Image: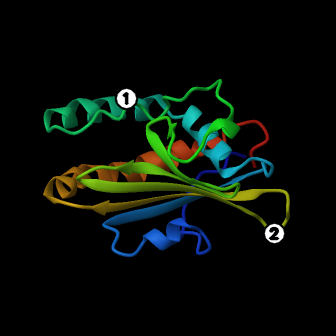
């Protein structure tokens, strides 16, 4: 049985929960994984490595459009160094298209900050009561800084509600996923 991500609440004991005040947008999606040994960053890497082709194509289209407005080309979500060990990632470095802000075994904060938006993505894992699985929650928090940021979020908000669970579903496609 393949489990699908479900819309969720932000984990109350997470660092990302502290960033919700004043947010222009946030959402959270949760999936179950049997990979209890895996860190939050490793769960993110597994999901990003399995980014659906259509998501990377959408990112390509986004990059072409926003460059006309003077915004930066982010690349594709699946643009990762697959040979790089997860232990080599450190705060301040890059994880694909994101900057790594904070890193613990149970939560990783990634994102991007520019003059238009502050975007923070959290992957948080919590051991479930049966001890045989973890709940993995993907939370996105956006703080808009100006009019261009607000305009940018108009098409991004509905698209994100489709893209975030599609990427998180990559965890369920792995061997050993619950």
- Which numbered disc, 2 or 1, marks the residue that appears first in the sequence? 1
How far from the left and from the top, in percent, is residue 116?
Answer: 23, 53
Left or right: where 167 falls relative to 151: right
Mark number displayed over residue 129: 2
How far from the left and from the top, in percent, is residue 173?
Answer: 66, 38
Mark number displayed over residue 126: none
* Element type where label 2 sits in the image: loop
Q: Residue at x 26, y 36 (%)?
A: 72
Q: Which residue is mark 1?
A: 57
Residues at marks 2 and 1, CA–CA distance in whole angstroms: 38 Å
User: Eyeballing the image, is 143 above or below 173?
Assistant: below
Q: Residue at x 79, y 52 (%)?
A: 36
User: Eyeballing the image, is 12 above or below 67?
Assistant: below
Q: Residue at x 53, y 56 (%)?
A: 122
Left or right: where 1 falls relative to 44: right
Closer-to-camera residue (61/74): 74
Q: Residues within 10 Å of mark 1 (few under 14, many from 20)?
A: few
């Amino acid at each position: 049985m393949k489990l699908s991500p479900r819309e969720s609440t932000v984990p109350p004991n997470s660092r990302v929960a502290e960033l919700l005040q004043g947010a222009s947008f946030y959402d959270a999606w949760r999936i179950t994984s049997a990979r209890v040994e895996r860190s939050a960053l490793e769960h993110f890497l597994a999901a990003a490595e399995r980014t659906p082709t259509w998501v990377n194509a959408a990112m390509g289209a986004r990059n072409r459009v926003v460059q006309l407005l003077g915004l930066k080309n982010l690349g594709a979500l699946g643009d990762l160094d697959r040979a790089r060990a997860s232990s080599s990632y450190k705060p301040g470095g890059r994880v694909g298209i994101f900057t790594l802000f904070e890193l613990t075994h149970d939560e990783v904060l990634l994102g991007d900050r520019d003059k238009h938006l502050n975007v923070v993505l959290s992957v948080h894992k919590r051991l479930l009561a049966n001890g045989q699985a973890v709940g993995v929650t993907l939370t996105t928090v956006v703080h808009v800084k100006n009019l261009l940021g607000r305009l940018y979020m108009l098409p991004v908000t509905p698209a994100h509600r489709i893209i975030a669970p599609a990427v998180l579903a990559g965890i369920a496609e792995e061997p050993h996923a619950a």
